[in-house]
Amino acid sequence: MFCVAWSAPLHDVGSMGSPLSQTLLVTGGAGFVGANLIKSLLTDFPAAAIVSLDNYFNELSNDPVLRDKLQFWVFTYSTSNPILQSAAELRQALADVAKEVDPEGQDPALKNMVLIGHSQGGLLARLMITDSGTRFWDSAAKVPFSEIDAPPQTKALLERVVFFKPVPSVKRVIFVSTPHGGSYRVSSLVLGLIRKIVTLPATLVSEIDEVTRLNATKLKSVGEGLPTAIDNMNPNGRFVHTLATCPTAPGVPKHSIISVLGEGPVSGKTDGVVAYESAHIEGVESEKVVRSSHSTQGEPETILEVHRILLEHVGVTR
């Protein structure tokens, strides 16, 4: 699940594009299945209004203060694609929608966003406030990017994916059950099974294969192929280690909501997917532990904590 909360009422995104011919209701839209169903429906019914019914959004939007000051948008993405690729798509989507609804760049709400990401979505939120430098490229290549042989279109794609700066309009992020240090569930057996059932975009795979073929002596670990998001969440993998070295934008508050199962000290506990030690990071404004499974976004404690943070963001104290 990935949510964008804007800091003032904006245009109704449901009225953009073609005239609406029907309204489709999706229950549980904040969850994995609901979010992916919404993505499919948007493709199959581009003229339809998609209404998501979920405790997460309903409870937050029921507060008249938040309803007056915020608008919630949802970004859907393929959870199997490489995380850096999904982050590049989010970065582009934020730029595109801002240009579409506010071509003159005059709406202050579009410059004051809160990103809320659950699980892998939390990693996307983190990447929106991350300065990559050359770290991700250096982790995969032996030579500078300028020395790589690739068709211009492929080279431009690589550059968008591995080199990025914080998105200036993102002013706060909320991590929910986010595996900053990877997931302990990702083992060699799981990776083998995932690779058999996950299908990555054919065009992306062929472009990366061509880069590998043209630069076999310039790249590290040739032969591994294009990683999936599951590969990226291997605690011992290159992505997790590189992300840990990347600085985030100064002055952007970060908040953690961490789910754990069982009572007592949180050290050594997990939510069934992510260990507490993986979800915990230093430098956050607040950390809230919720005793629940990994799918904590519908838990009352989680919703109340997001509610508290959003009120703080809009300057309301209760």
Image (cartoon, rainbow, N blue to C red):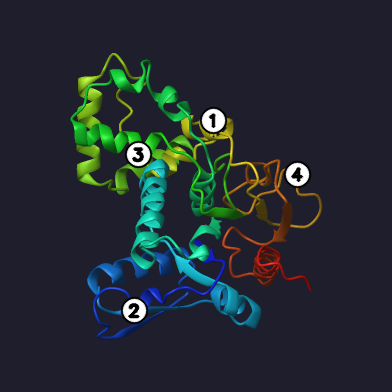
Instruction: Decide which of 247, 257 is in the foreground and name it.
Output: 247
Nearer-the-camera pick, 179 or 263: 179
Residue under label 3: 160
* Label 4: which secondary element: loop
Q: Where 217 falls versus 100 (above or below)?
A: above
Residue at x 70% of width, y 47% of height: 284
Q: Which residue is mark 2?
A: 15
The secondary element bearing badge 1 is classed as: helix
Please tell me which of labels 1 and 3 falls first in the chain. Answer: 3
Query: Is label 1 in contact with label 4 (beta carbons under 8 Å)?
Result: no
Instruction: Tell me how far mark 1 sits from mark 3, CA to CA.
Output: 20 Å
| Contact between labelled residues 2 and 1, with CB atoms less than 8 Å apart | no
Nearer to the camera, 215 or 160: 160
Q: Residue at x 36, y 77 (%)?
A: 14
Label 1 and label 2: CA atoms lie apart by 42 Å
Q: Report which quarter residue 65 is drawn in.
A: bottom right
Q: Earlier in the sequence, mark 2 or mark 4?
A: 2
In the picture of the structure, the residue carrying the numbered disc 1 is: 241
